[in-house]
Amino acid sequence: MKELSKSGAGELLQSLHSQVQLPTPYSEDVFLLETVVAGTTHVAGIEELEPFLHSGDRLELIRVPENPSDPNAIKIYTRDRVKLGYVPRKDNLILARLMDAGKLLHAVVAEKRWQQDWLRITIEIYMTDD
């Protein structure tokens, strides 16, 4: 058995580090929840916008703590900064706290479909490190 000397300790550690694959924090987006965009019936021109929304489209989430009816409000925008609606109140408390703590969240369109005069947009919300 080979004895380890002080001069060889650095080589041993370097050898161990090169063989161990440690996970990188947030190297991939972390799925948080699936929900539906609230308020699409109040978006002017949603009928014209709908054909440009596709599954997989990334959406921006913007905190609106000054919203008088909901201090946990989170607006949802397209990449072109067109407002789609809000994260539903029933889902926004933890997301708002994460965003207020500096975490980066975004959404992705999972599905869209018309239900009479309502455009139902299902989204997935993720936390990301980029």
Image: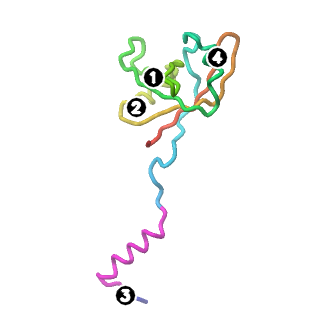
Q: How is the image coloured?
A: rainbow
Residue 121: x percent and y percent? 62, 23
Mark pair 2, 3: CA separation: 52 Å
Element class at badge 1: strand
> Do the numbered discs 2 and 1 sit on residues whose CB atoms are within 8 Å?
yes
Say what amino acid the circle numbered 2 marks. Answer: Met
Q: Which residue is mark 4?
A: 119
> Do the numbered discs 1 and 4 sit on residues whose CB atoms are within 8 Å?
no
Mark pair 2, 1: CA separation: 9 Å
Which is more foreground, mark 1 or mark 4?
4
In magenta segment, residue 15? yes
Which is more foreground, mark 4 or mark 2?
4
Say what amino acid the circle numbered 1 marks. Answer: Ile
Q: Residue 99 shows which numbered tag?
A: 2
Residue 33: x percent and y percent? 55, 33
Residue stretch rendered in magenta on the structure? 3-21
In magenta segment, residue 119? no
Residue 128: x percent and y percent? 47, 40
Instruction: Give the camera-side residue of 63 and 46.
Output: 46
Q: Residue 59 shows which numbered tag?
A: none
Which is more foreground, mark 4 or mark 3?
4
Element class at badge 2: helix
